[in-house]
Amino acid sequence: MTKPIADWLVIGGGITGAAVAYELQQTGYSVILLEKSPRPENATSLGYGGLGFWSGRTSWWRTLAKESRDLHQSFAERWDTELRELPLLLTVDHEEDPTAITNQFSDCEIPPQWLSPKEAKSLEPELNISEIQGAFQAFHGQVNGFKLQQAYLREFQVAGGRVYTGAVIHLTPQNLSQQSSCPKWLITTHHTNYLTSNVLIAAGSGSRKLLDGLSLHLPLYFTEEQVLISQPQPLQLRTMVMSATLQRLPLETAIAKHWNTPAPDSLPAIIDTGAIQMPDGRLFIGQRTSAPKNDPSSPASAEQALRSQLRKILPRIADLPATLRTCQVTFSPREQPLVGPIHGHPGLYLFNGFTSPLLLVPPLARHFAQQLRGQSSHSLIQSLDTVDCS
């Protein structure tokens, strides 16, 4: 069976796909959103909802962060997304150099301020300050990412958008002439085919498989992420607690470098220590990151490693009952995410590779739709060239 023609078909129903589908529908396009699972467990559902409005280092990022703050405030008023702002404590252990970290933060829109252990403890009584030499303080936004995603999907359908469930098997070009008004792409699932003029791939780590099926090589990669998530707890954190030095970033650089070769043993999993509480009392405990297919650890040993690291900083939280959850998270080594048309393939677009999706996706999705209509004053969307991945 073949579904009717649509102007756009968006693949992926996470926060990226939901936001772009909503914005495209709002600007007058007919849009189909295709999600492989009726209950996806993706980075949106397993994320703590961080919004680093303070963290922009480039004019591009700062522009979007300011727009993002306004959009999230509007969404919170309309959709009850649990938006709030809390102190963020970025802890520094005794082996790290606070001066070097200060320099790294110096070009942020709002550089975090240094706190002594005693000052950090006054903000977060759960901290074990014997394990740190201090912390940097910023004010960090938080939103319920799942609620925001569901609101996007709901409002998308209210505006006339269509949501279907099905895993994409093939993307097949039909007519790639720029001048042709005929559908350019056939999307095949197990049960239904879809014809569309434009395809936007926003399928997280699944985007790699779709691009590979078209022999398209772009700098889009993914990691395996594990986090412990508790049930609502009476114990209350007053702040968000993270490490000031993220171990994930150098691991991502190494993963991209070795993507098409066997991952060396020198790419062990890393742990970024911290704990963040949602308004409903659930705790997100630690984050363990590994290269795909390069992690021999069992779930039990992964959980033990997360708890062991956190026990040094937040001992009472480290042993709370929690469930280990796993998902794949995409990234791009470029300074900007991969958002725009794919060069040489008319009607094919990518919206992926976000470091801070809940911060950047809402304003970028709006610019994407408006730029297609000639309504955006910013040139934030660029044509994407394939790269030599040999």
Image (cartoon, rainbow, N blue to C red):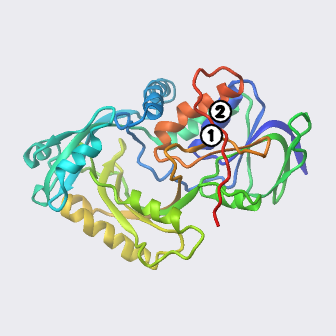
Can you give x and y, in whole percent of width and height, for residue 113 in the image? 19, 38
Label 2 environment density (alpha carbons within 10 Å; few <14, some 14–19, many ≥20): many
Q: Would you name the residue on which mark 1 appears?
A: 18
Left-right relation of 24 to 230: right
Left-right relation of 76 to 304: right
Residue at left 42%, top 31%? 62
Left-right relation of 382 to 327: right
Q: Please, what is the three-letter code of the amino acid marked with disc 1?
A: Ala
Relative to 192, say whether 155 is above or below. above
Mark 2–mark 1 contact, CB under 8 Å? yes
Q: Please indicate, yes or no, whether residue 319 appears anywhere in the rendered image.
A: no
Q: Would you name the residue on which mark 2 appears?
A: 22
Residue at left 24%, top 49%? 101
Q: How many discs mark residues in the rendered view?
A: 2
Residue at left 63%, top 35%? 154
Q: Nearer the viewer, residue 142 or 58?
A: 58
Q: Please, what is the three-letter code of the amino acid marked with disc 2?
A: Tyr
Can you give x and y, in whole percent of width and height, for residue 285 in the image? 33, 58
Instruction: Give the numbered dot on residue 28.
Output: none
